[in-house]
Image (spheres, rainbow, N blue to C red):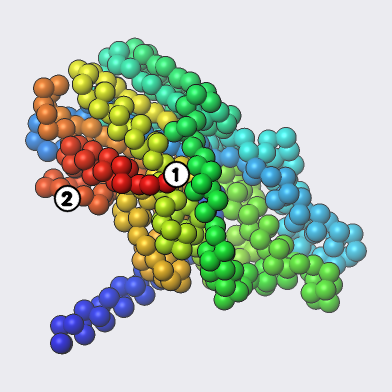
Amino acid sequence: MRKLIIAVILGCITLQATAQDIWKEIDQNPRRSASNYMAYPEPTKPLTPAPKGKKPFYISHYGRHGSRFIINHRDYDYPYFTLLLADSLGKLNEKGKEILRRMALLRDDARDRLGELTPLGAQQHRDIARRMYQRFPEVFKGDVCVDAKSTVVIRCILSMENALQELVSLNPKLRITHDASEHDMYYMNFRDPKLRKKILPKVSQDIYNEFCLRHVDPKRPVESLFNDTTYSNNCVNLERLNYYIFKVVSIAQNTEMRDKIDFYDLYNTDELYVNWRKDNVYWYLTYGPSPQNGGTQPFTQRNLLRKMIEEADSCIALPRPGATLRFGHETMVMPLTCLLGLNGYDIQVEDVEQLEDKGWVNYRIFPMGANIQFIFYRKNPKDQDVLIKVLLNEEEATLPIATDCAPYYHWNDFRQHFLQKLDNYKD
């Protein structure tokens, strides 16, 4: 009984520490509060050496495009024109005028570039490709093939081209093929109409709305921009203004203005954390393995995973296969991460208040440039015991299957487990 009590206490301490850790992470780097707008963080942990005699020979990859501009002009226009009107009426204080100035600069910087890849986004994919080459040089040795596919969205195409340019600059002998066609969208960017209808059912919408009511958008940051509280309370939708300003605050880190304009002096850590929690819950309830919508959204990526397995089987049969690279969106990377159960991200959480306590932290999954890499190892082409290692954002990840050589897994075990999982799914 005493051991049980101690275990329960330790469990509670662990849960509490997890939430505190996320708050501390945001406090240390406010840009983490941006969720899917977070700029790609470079990996920091060293890789575990391969088992004796095993060498990398093939890479299968799916990555999100790099940093981009905001997609919808409304995200700039609403806060800009709200503050511009208040300024014309003499209702902004000096802080408000300064935020309006910064907003105007960012809005002008994004003019006619909505949704486009930024220079930082291009550099991210060059850096990811370079590290891939340097970490696994055996894969890219000589005149091996690198086959790349992109969705038909220009920011994804440019992300692909920047990665390929970096690879060919490192090894001009590479035989590169690349394409972006509707022909491949059935797995590169599959839009399942049945699952799409279930993405946010009423029960999930109610849970999210109730969560937002319990954790109201902080008004202090936007209230602090006005010199007339009667005007700000009666003539401004403060919650909506906060929503849009926070989006602009979050996206700014992805542009060339990131070192010239910083909005984080507007928010304290508690306020950033509240804004982030809402995004975290929303993404879980929509694209995650949320039990509230049946836990089936990760299966939107069933075609992609099956394709990756099929192509890997074909490449394993080759003496020198090279790499297969794919470039798409966070709405593929997140559900694929959940479908694979990487780092426990297939977790089912009934109480969304406990999400981060259970380890669900969205910015660890899908920052700009997010990627999943399968690295394949063997001793030689005749070696039947192929091993794989999975990297999430270039860091070693766990899989929900047994292994005797973690963080490496036997390909046959992986293949059997996930083909069975895909076969068992009924749409």
Residue under numbered circle 1: 300
Q: What residue type is disc 1 on? A: Thr
Q: Quadrant of residue 247?
A: bottom right
On screen, residue 222 versus residue 276, left or right, reads right
Residue under numbered circle 2: 402
Answer few, some or many: residues within 10 Å of disc 2's Cα (few below 14, many 20 plus, some between 14 and 19): few
Percent of width and height locating residue 328: 49, 35
Asked whether residue 156 is in view, the answer is yes
Residue with the most extreme front position: 426
Residue with the most extreme right position: 89
On screen, residue 57 versus residue 40, left or right, reads left
Give 152 or 103, whichever is nearer the viewer. Answer: 152
Residue at the spot x=45%, y=51% of the render?
A: 297
Give 391 or 228, whichever is nearer the viewer. Answer: 391
State whether residue 189 is above or below residue 15: above
* Mark in front: 2 vs 1: 1
Tell me how far mark 2 sits from mark 1, CA to CA. Answer: 25 Å
Asked whether residue 162 is in view, the answer is no
Q: What residue type is disc 2 on? A: Ala
